[in-house]
Every structure is written in C-alpha cells, then in structure tokens.
Image (cartoon, rainbow, N blue to C red):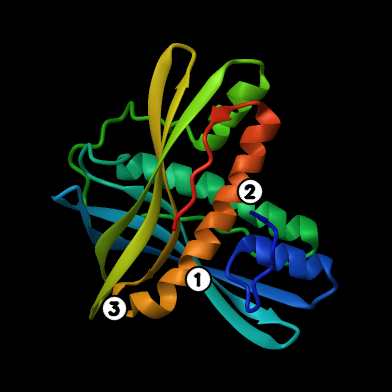
Amino acid sequence: MEGTEVHKPPRRVTDLVELKKAGAQVTCEPSFEVLPVDFVHQKTQFQAYIFLCRFKGSVDDENYQFRKCYARGCPHNLCPHVAQAIMIANRYLQRDLRRLRKSGIEVADRMFTLDDMVVKFEDQKEDSGPLMTIHDYINVAKEGNAVSVEIFLEFVPAVEHFAHEKNKQTFLTCDFAVTTLGRTGHYQRCVGCFATEREAEERPEAVVVANQRLALLYQEFDQAGIQYEKRFFE
C-alpha cells in the first residue's frame, strides 16, 4: 500500500505537497466550516459537530477542491467534547499548514474558531484539557515506552446540516484503542467521506484516499516501534 501515490486532481494535503515537489505551480486557499451532523453509530443516534477544512486552489492552472475533517466534537460523552475537539482540530490543521509551507506552497495562517456557531455548551468544564492525539502516542513510543494499538474501522452514516439544506454523508472513521503506560485510551479519526446518495460513484475513491492516509500513519507507527495490526477499508 503506497501512501504517497498522487491523485490528479489532488484529494489530500499530501497530494499538494508531492505535486509541488514535482515542479507544479500550486495555489491553496483553505476555508473552514463547523457543521452540526446527525450520526448513527451502532443504532445510537446523536448529534456532533465536525470541523471541516475545504482546500481550494489550482495546480498548473487547473482548479481543484477537496475537504478534510479534522475532528468531531459532542456536547456529551459519545465523542470528545467540542471544546477539546477544536484544540485537536487546530493541532492537526497547523501540522498540515506547516507541511504546505515547507514545500513552498503559500497558505494563510488560520485556525478553527467557534465564534460563528449559534450553540452553547452548558456542560463545558473549565478544567477540560486537550485530549491525547494519535501523534502524542507516537511520541510516547519514540521515547522508549511500549505502545500497542488496536484499530477498528467503520463506515458511519450521517446527515450534515448546512444553512438551508441537509446533506447525507458517510464517514470513514477509525477508532484507535491505544494501550501504554498501564492505561488504554481511545482516539477517533475521520480519514474520508462520500455522499451517501452517490455511494456507487464516490465510495471507491473515498476508500482509496482513506487507505492512503492510513498507510502514511502506519509508516509512523513502524518508525516508532508501535505494536499493531494493519487494517484497511474495503
């Protein structure tokens, strides 16, 4: 499984970086959305907020557009709290923006905010801190600690709520059960999505993109000496 195979038009941040390295003229203008989404997970229905970045621009004067989900937050305990999710989203966003700039692609330094959300989080606690991300666990392993990861993959149906419409979307999600330092923690990550009503056309490409993202992450697991069994979407 080759994690650096380039999609044309680009579908990942990695694609933009590789195209730039190959000598292409690449522009990129990210924009951000925080959308309320109705999820169904193991027959349990709940609403969460997803932090999306839409990457738009051109490669050698040909326009492209793709989106990436950086985190999912809930006002209850079925996933990370929204206040924690936005911190996770911004950590991964800044990581991607640094990769783009390092490759020579100019991109504005922006982050997700909750300023435009018409929602209040009554159960937010002042002492809620950032959750461990999967790359925090990778760093724990690099420091010489034993880390093992059990990986669960799932297609999760959902309905995104825009200002004047609803959009049925299926998310390709990963649940990492990470055991280290005498404790087991769970970390969830979305690695792809497709329009549910266009499953026949869009699912195959979404699976390819998701598996390439997983392949890159597994390379980091290998380099850190993490114990795990590779799993890919089918």
Q: N-terminal of the two: label 1 or label 3?
A: 3
Q: Are marks 3 and 2 in contact (CB under 8 Å)?
A: no
Q: Residue at x 64, y 72 (%)?
A: 7
Asked whether 138 or 214 is in front, the reply is 214
x and y percent of residue 128 in the render? Answer: 34, 30
- Identify the image quadrant of the N terminus: bottom right
Quarter where residue 131 is shown: top left
Residue neighbourhood size for the residue with mark 1, other residues' Cα within 10 Å, grouped as few (<14), some (14–19), many (≥20)? some
Q: Which residue is mark 1?
A: 205
- Total labels drawn: 3
Residue at 65% across, 77% down: 8
Instruction: Give the amino acid at mark 3.
Output: Glu
How far is disc 1 from disc 2 in space, using C-alphas?
Answer: 17 Å
Label disc, if present, on residue 197 of the rendered structure:
3
Numbered circle sitting on residue 115 = none
Q: In which image quadrant can residue 219 be found?
A: top right
Which residue matches tag 2?
216
Q: Taking 150 as reference, is 37 above or below it?
A: below
Instruction: Pick out the residue farthest to the right.
Output: 23
In the picture, which quadrant includes the C terminus?
bottom left
Which of disc 2 and disc 3 is earlier in sequence?
Answer: 3
Q: Reply above or below: 209 against 10.
A: above
Residue type pointed to by label 1: Glu
Give the farthest residue toward the bottom.
61
Amino acid type of the residue tagged 2 in the rendering: Leu
